[in-house]
């Protein structure tokens, strides 16, 4: 299991000052024999699972709340999913959307670290029909 | 040159059919591409398009179509496909087909698939897309020259035509047998005999229909081409409508085709989908049940009224159930024959003609165009009597002979 | 604990589940299992006809094939899960979550399993995000 390959996507929050180039250099500096591919949002890392998890732990330690990560089903440059072969892959727009959200999540993690806690918010309710009728009548 | 077919789709990868789609495209020298869009493009495209589906993949389809329409992304043809039985996708699929046709000159084909889709089912459609893109010059050919032969190996019948200097000088047909080469050899020999020429004198051969590849190899044909484009050429030649616009309706033995042409060049088409229900096959089954020859069905139908024996041939199994029921109720054969023709006409209207923008005149061809009752019913359903040219069952063979002369 | 995430391909949810000490169950893992299988050649994802047929366990034959194929990927993950986190009102969900009917079915299957589930709204503002992260953290710490 530990020898099984893992391909992991690291994405830098848009609120971070870190660049993909810096992130890639950092991963390389760990000195491990891993495949690292710089991308517009961060990098892809591919290695046996144990190795990738070690890198993940180090990245989290160095950049705790500004680099996010998930596994990727396909190997780096897998022709079945490579953008150069067909055009964008189906999940591309999803990543773009989530990348934008990371800025807020980074802020959320920072605040929680500083002690912020969950406070339930009341759901926005629809206007009561009677109240709406009243408004209409006034108009 | 690889032809780029832009795929606008939902569900293909999760239905195990994407591989089959790409295989079909590859086999006709095309590749499947996806127009690039960003998340921001999607919002704008959906807003502009005005139809806001709930499923994000359908929104992505809309954005990809907008990229093609704007010309920002270049492709040669468009393939729009979604899961069979998904209503939301069917709405988007059809509206995008219309949108692409209104905003681009790209040939487009739509298809709704099940998980059982195989590449072979898409082959004719993909091949036609490629033919329209790559053989524009050949398709513009209006006159047959030299001494050529066209062979049409259809699902029900096999036809041969010998042409010389833009005239048919020999022709024959026979029901398709188990061995396509045998049926073709038989009709070819008879057509050659009628023409008074020998096989050695023939300068070029064109093959079409389901058996086109086998026949093409056997007879060393110069042209091996799918029936959508070949038939439409044959139709406009026979009807002498080489200029201007027209719609060709070909109700075949296994599937129905509707093709629009402009100056004799096909630009869009639709072909019956996953069921042979409302095709010539249903009329054959009706004739068998009535114990009459299919050549008599049309005349009988013209003497009846479909309103007296309602029937639905959407599915041939249910269609036959309707047939059994109406006959069981003691309905007149004339009314039953008429109802069968009306039902097929209705299905052609509801299925094929909704997927293209009908242009006038309407030319009805293929073996079934000899069934007068069916032509009458097509006319009634469409509100316009179609033109049936002479030798209308020979369209494929004529198209083959005409186009193969382009290789001389 | 094994936590099923919905959307099952979400980077944010995958990251937070791992960050707070659990194992996320995602589409990526289900697809990796397939694409690494060299005996199957059905690119791009190696979702096969067998998968689509297996999807009948979750949705009948009258349901479009794309939904059944997706269910074949997610159904076993939901069955394996000890808990689930669902983010509602995502502005977009693409790729494997491109079909809205399939997405509805996921939520229903999670509900039917009766496992501990946290349902959160997509955070629109920084303040929403603080609340979302805090809630997710507290909930996941409570699962241990």
Image (cartoon, coloured by chain):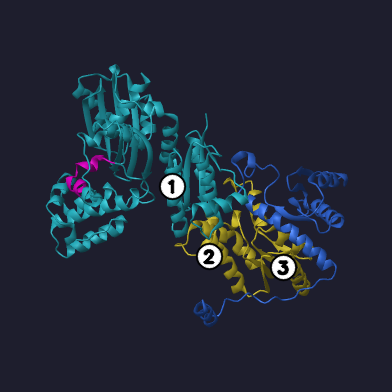
Chain colours: A blue, B cyan, C yellow
- Location of residue C97 in the rendering, given as x and y in whole percent from the top left corner: 59, 58
Q: Is residue B364 visible?
A: yes
Q: Is the residue B290 above or below the residue B6 in the image?
A: below
Q: Mark 2 points at which residue?
A: C57
Counting residues from the start of the chain, the first of labels 3 and 2 encountered is 2
Quarter of the rendering occupied by the N terminus of chain A: bottom right
- Tell if the residue under mark 3 belongs to the same chain as the one under mark 2: yes
Foreground residue among C45 and A42: A42
Please state which of residues B243 and A38 is positioned toward the viewer in this rendering.
B243
Q: In this view, does B32 lie to the left or right of B101?
A: right
**Residue range (magenta):** B360-376
Q: Name the residue under label 3.
A: C128
Q: Which mark is residue B97?
A: 1
> Within 10 angstroms of label 3, few (less than 14), some, or many (20 or more) residues?
some
For the residues labelled 1 and 2, the Cα–Cα distance comes to: 34 Å
Q: Are discs 1 and 2 both within one chain?
A: no
Bin the neighbour count of mark 1 within 10 Å (Cα to Cα): few under 14, some 14-19, many 20 and up: many
- Labels 1 and 3 touching (C-beta < 8 A): no
The CA span between labels 3 and 2 is: 38 Å
Q: Residue at x 62, y 51 (%)?
A: B39
Are discs 1 and 3 both within one chain?
no
Residue contact between numbered discs 3 and 2, judged by CB atoms under 8 Å: no
């Amino acid at each position: 299991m530990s020898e099984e390959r893992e391909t992991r996507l690291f994405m830098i929050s848009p609120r971070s000052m870190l660049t993909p180039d810096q992130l890639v250099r950092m991963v390389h500096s760990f000195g491990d024999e891993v495949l690292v591919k710089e991308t517009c949002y961060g990098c892809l890392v591919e290695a046996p699972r144990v190795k990738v998890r070690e890198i993940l732990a180090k990245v989290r330690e160095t950049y705790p709340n500004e680099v996010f990560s998930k596994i990727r089903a396909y190997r780096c440059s897998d022709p079945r999913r490579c953008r150069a072969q067909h055009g964008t892959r189906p999940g591309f727009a999803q990543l773009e959307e989530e990348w934008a959200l990371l800025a807020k999540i980074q802020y959320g993690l920072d605040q929680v670290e500083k002690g912020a806690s969950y406070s339930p918010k009341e759901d926005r309710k629809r206007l009561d029909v009677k109240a709406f009728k009243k408004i209409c009548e006034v108009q | 040159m690889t032809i780029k077919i832009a795929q606008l789709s939902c569900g293909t990868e999760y239905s195990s059919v994407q591989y089959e789609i790409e295989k079909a495209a590859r086999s006709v020298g095309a590749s499947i591409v996806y127009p690039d869009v960003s998340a921001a493009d999607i919002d704008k495209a959906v807003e502009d398009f005005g139809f806001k589906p709930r499923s994000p993949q359908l929104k992505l389809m809309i954005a990809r179509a907008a990229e093609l329409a704007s010309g920002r992304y270049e492709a040669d043809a468009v393939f729009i496909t979604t899961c069979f039985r998904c209503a939301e996708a069917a709405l988007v699929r059809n509206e995008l087909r219309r949108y692409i046709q209104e905003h681009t000159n790209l040939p487009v084909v739509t298809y709704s698939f099940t998980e059982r889709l195989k590449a072979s089912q898409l082959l004719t459609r993909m091949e036609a897309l490629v033919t329209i893109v790559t053989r524009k010059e050949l398709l513009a050919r209006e006159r047959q020259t030299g001494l050529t032969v066209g062979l049409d190996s259809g699902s029900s019948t096999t036809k041969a035509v010998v042409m010389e200097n833009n005239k048919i000088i020999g022709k024959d047909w026979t029901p398709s047998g188990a061995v396509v080469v045998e049926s073709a050899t038989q009709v070819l020999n008879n057509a050659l005999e009628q023409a008074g020429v020998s096989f050695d004198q023939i300068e070029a051969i064109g093959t079409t229909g389901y058996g086109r590849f086998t026949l093409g190899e056997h007879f060393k044909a110069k042209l091996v081409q799918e029936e959508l484009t070949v038939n439409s050429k044959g139709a406009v030649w026979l009807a002498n409508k080489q200029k201007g616009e027209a719609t060709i309706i070909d109700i075949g033995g296994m599937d129905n085709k509707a093709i629009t042409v402009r100056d004799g060049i096909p630009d869009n088409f639709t072909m019956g989908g996953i069921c042979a229900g409302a095709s010539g096959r249903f009329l054959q089954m009706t004739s068998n049940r009535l114990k009459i020859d299919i050549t008599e069905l049309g005349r009988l139908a013209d003497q009846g009224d479909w309103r007296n024996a309602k029937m639905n041939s959407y599915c041939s199994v249910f269609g036959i159930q309707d047939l059994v029921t109406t006959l069981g109720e003691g309905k007149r054969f004339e009314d039953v024959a008429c109802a069968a023709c009306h039902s097929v006409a209705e299905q052609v209207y509801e299925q094929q003609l909704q997927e293209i923008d009908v242009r006038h005149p309407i030319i009805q061809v293929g073996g079934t165009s000899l069934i007068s009752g069916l032509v009458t019913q097509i006319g009634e359903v469409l509100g316009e009597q179609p033109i049936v040219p002479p030798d209308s069952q020979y369209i494929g063979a004529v198209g083959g002979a005409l186009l193969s002369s382009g290789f001389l | 604990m094994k936590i099923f995430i919905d959307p099952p391909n979400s980077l944010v949810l995958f990251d937070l589940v791992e960050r707070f000490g659990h194992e996320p169950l995602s589409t990526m893992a289900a697809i990796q299992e397939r694409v690494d299988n060299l005996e199957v050649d059905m690119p791009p994802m190696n979702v096969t006809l067998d998968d689509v047929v297996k999807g009948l366990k979750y949705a009948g034959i009258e349901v479009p094939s794309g939904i059944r194929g997706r269910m074949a990927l997610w159904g076993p993950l939901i069955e394996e899960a000890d808990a689930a986190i669902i983010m509602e009102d995502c502005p977009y969900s693409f790729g494997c979550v491109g079909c809205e009917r399939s997405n509805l079915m996921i939520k229903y299957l999670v509900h039917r399993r009766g496992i501990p589930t946290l349902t959160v709204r997509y955070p629109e503002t920084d303040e929403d995000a603080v609340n979302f992260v805090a809630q997710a953290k507290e909930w996941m710490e409570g699962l241990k």
